[in-house]
Structure formats: C-alpha cells, structure tokens
Image (cartoon, helix red, strand yellow):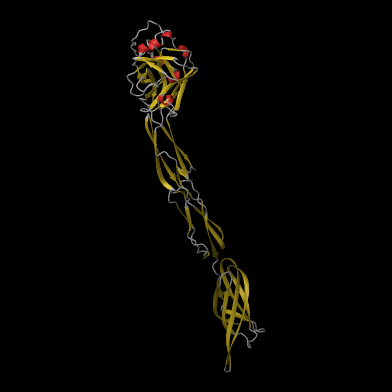
Amino acid sequence: MRRTLLPLTLALAVLAACQDATAPTTPATLAPRSRPSADLAVGEQLDQENLSANSGAGTGSIYFGQSFTAGVSGALTRIEFQINCQYNAQDMVLRVYEGSYDVYEVDFGYPPVVLKELASAPVAATTWPSCNTNPYVGPSWIGVALDTPATLVAGQQYMFRLTCAGCGTFQINHPMSNDDPYAGGKAFVWPTYDNVFRTYVVPDNTPPTVTPTITGTLGSNGWYTSDVTLAWSAADGESTVSAQTGCGPTTVRSDTPGVTFTCSATSGGGTATQSVTIRRDATAPAIAVTGVTQGATYTLGSVPAGGCATTDALSGVATNATVSTSGGPTGSVTTTCGGAVDNAGNAAASVSVGYTVLAPPPVLSIDANGTLDKRTGAAIITGTATCSSALSVTVSAGLSQQQTKGKTTTTLSGGGSTTIACSGTTAWMVTITPSSSATGRFAAGVASATASAPRATTASRTVQLK
C-alpha cells in the first residue's frame, strides 16, 4: 500500500471530502502543550521531542511512526504524538522497537531487518477527534503510557510505530515537518520528514547491582574446603547493562591464601564494581608422632616420652593434636596422635606408632656356699633374682670343676634349671648332677647362672660346696 504525504495546500484539496471547505491553507504554529504536573509519573521527565510542523499527511496508520535517539538512559514510560482525526481504526497498538528501518525497504521488496520489540500499549481511539475539522490545524496530543516501560540506553536509536487491525488508506491525519528538524531520527515515511512527538523517560541515576554467587563448601573463618565456583550477575531495573568486565564464571581448584576477582558492570546509571576474595584450604593439618619410633624396642623405665607435632601450611593450626597411649606397660605399645584441626575446619586423621617395651632383666646373684649331696654327688647351688616387676624367670645354673689324679686332669661339669615367680628379690635353687661321663664328685667349683626370661642375664662366681 502506498502512502500520500502532501504539502498543506495540496493535502487540504485531496481531503476535501472530509474537511471543512473553508480550512486555512497555512499551517498553525504548534506550541508546546500545557501539561499539568500531576500527569507525570514519579521521576518522569521529557527526553526527546519535535514540535516543528509545516506540512501534514493522511496516512494508513501502519505507516505512522518515528525513530528517535535516547538522550538519557532509563525507562521509556510514555510517548505522545499529534493526530487530528482517524477513520474507523480499531485495535490500535503503539509498539516500541530497538533500532529503526525505512519504510522504503518494505515498499520495494527488500526484507527489513527484524527489530526487537521492547514494549507496547493499546491506543484508545475514542480519545481522538473526528475528521470534520482541518486535519492540520489544532491537532490533539495523544499520550500513550507503556504497559511495561522500555529500557533505553543513551545514544542508541529506537522507533515507535502504530499498528492496527482494519486500517486502510488515509486512516490518520497528522502534522509533519518536511525540513528534517529532528536530527535524532526520522518519520516512518520518508527520511527527510519528522512527526510531531514527545518521549518521556524515568532516568537511570544508579549503576547496576553487581552480585557474586559463590558455590562451594564453606569451612571456618571464611575458608572454603572444596573447589569453589564463582558466578556474577549484573542487573539494573532502570536501564540496560551495556558492558561487563571480569564477570565471567570461574572455578578455584587449588589451595590459595586468597585470590581476588573483580566484576565491573556499566549501565545508563554508571559503573558499579564488586570484588570477591576467595580463600581455599582443602588440606588437613599434618600430624607426626614424636619421641618414639615405629617398630623400635625399648626397656621399661627407659621408654622415650611420646608427643605430637602439628603443622598446617596455609590456614594455620586451630587445635593441636593430643597424644594417647594404649597397651603396655610391657609388650606391644601404641602411641597415637589425633584431634588436630586447622583454621579452615579441616580435621586431620589420627597417626599411630607401634613399638615394643620389655621389662628390665632380673639381677642374678649366686650364694658363695653351696651344698654337696654326698650320696649322689650332686651340687645344690642357690642364689637370688631381683626383678623390678612380677616376672616368670627361668634360672639355668652350671658348675664345673677340674680334678687331678696322678698326672691326669679332668673337668667335672653339670647343669640344671628352675623356674620361679620373681617379684622383688626372690630366692632360687638348682640341683646340679655331674654329667654321666664324669668319674668323680663335685667338691668345689665355679658356678654360673643364666636367667633366660624375659631377657637373658648372667652371673658367675666360685662356690664352695659343703
């Protein structure tokens, strides 16, 4: 469908069928509308306008519109334009788009760029005047409040346009200017024309809200004890967030005393910056058992004191490990260190060392005088064993004696053993019978004794037999 855009005198002639025949042939001066302050929403202010008109048009409403350049960033809340009359238009809607394109692209078959629709609002045709007046003199301002404000960015171009069902040729009469008075856009008809219009914006005076979202296991004192994922969001309810720097997601997978991430976001209200420092310590403290050694053997009374050493290379030690011992006092003994926690809340596993503790060997003594059994020739050797703790002690004793008959010297020897329950100083007695090959009897000799349990110890002396 083609549009007709006419200078004032020609337009009046063409539209004589629905216009007053005595209509003037010169356009009226369009003065800014006197508007009560109560009409403005809170914070709403005039942003863009064109009040210049030296011509007019009768246009199918699908071709009525205007592109404009936002002067401030914020929420576009209202658009006003001038229309004198309309012909049976119905279901009229004002739509706002991001960007603009010329109607010639449609007329000559070039597919237009698909523009992003930002907002829309119905237009009440009942508020418009009839066509029984000069279409270009004394037109009415039509104000349309957007159901949902459109977010504008200063310096970017937008377009509003009327759409409707049941619109035909010359449905709308409206004033225009043919000398391109508005530099920020153009009428949705020809590039050198502008419609009369106003836009109202609630300016964005505040920068975006930058919010970090941290996902991970939070331990103690602000430390994380697992991998940490950081994501950012930047939102501004009054204008579009036009730029973001350093706001991409990231994951911290290694322990660190602190790494700082910064996100900056810009909208029409300015730039906001938010920083987050992430500290990660997923490593438990190190514990070592001190004093005793794994697999070692010690003597009771000479066992080193067991202890614990606790270290943490990152967040530091909050609770040192404590020592405990199980088993003993002799035999298998285990020293354990446990209970260590670092400042991040990591708990260390217990560490143990196993070793053996033996009782001290008994102290053996042999009495100076023994007894000779003249009937059997056996020697009875006596003595004592002194033990620091109750032990079962086996004492093995031996006796040897050299005998000379004529020119022949022989050694007479024998041995025996006994087991005693040793506690403190305990007496023992061993009967020693000469070996079967001996031909004599003991008279005196050198006695020796050995305690074989729990640890070997020996004693010897010359014993007189009586």
5 above or below 460?
A: above
- Which one is in front, 328 or 30? 30
Could you tell whether 86 is left or right of 398 in the image? left
Question: Can you see residue 150?
Answer: no
Q: Is residue 163 above or below residue 327?
A: above
Q: Quadrant of the C terminus?
A: bottom right
Residue at the far top: name it: 22
Asked if residue 252 is positioned above or below residue 298 in the image, the reply reads: above
Percent x, y for residue 15? Answer: 41, 11
In the image, 29 versus 446, the foreground residue is 29
Quadrant position of residue 85: top left
Number of disc labels? 0
Across and down, in percent, residue 461 comes to 54, 79
Left or right: 66, with 464 as reference point: left
Find residue 332 and report its horizontal and vertical position in percent: 57, 62
Task: Work out whether residue 18 or residue 207 is closer to the camera in this orientation and state it.
Answer: 18
Most extreme residue toward the bottom is: 406
Q: Residue furthest right?
A: 375
Can residue 72 be seen in this snapshot? yes
Compared with 206, 168 (above or below) is above
Q: Position of residue 374 (x, y in %)?
A: 65, 84
If the image is split into quadrants, where does the N terminus sit?
A: top left
The foreground one among 119 and 411 is 119
Residue name at image x 45 percent, y 44 percent: 251
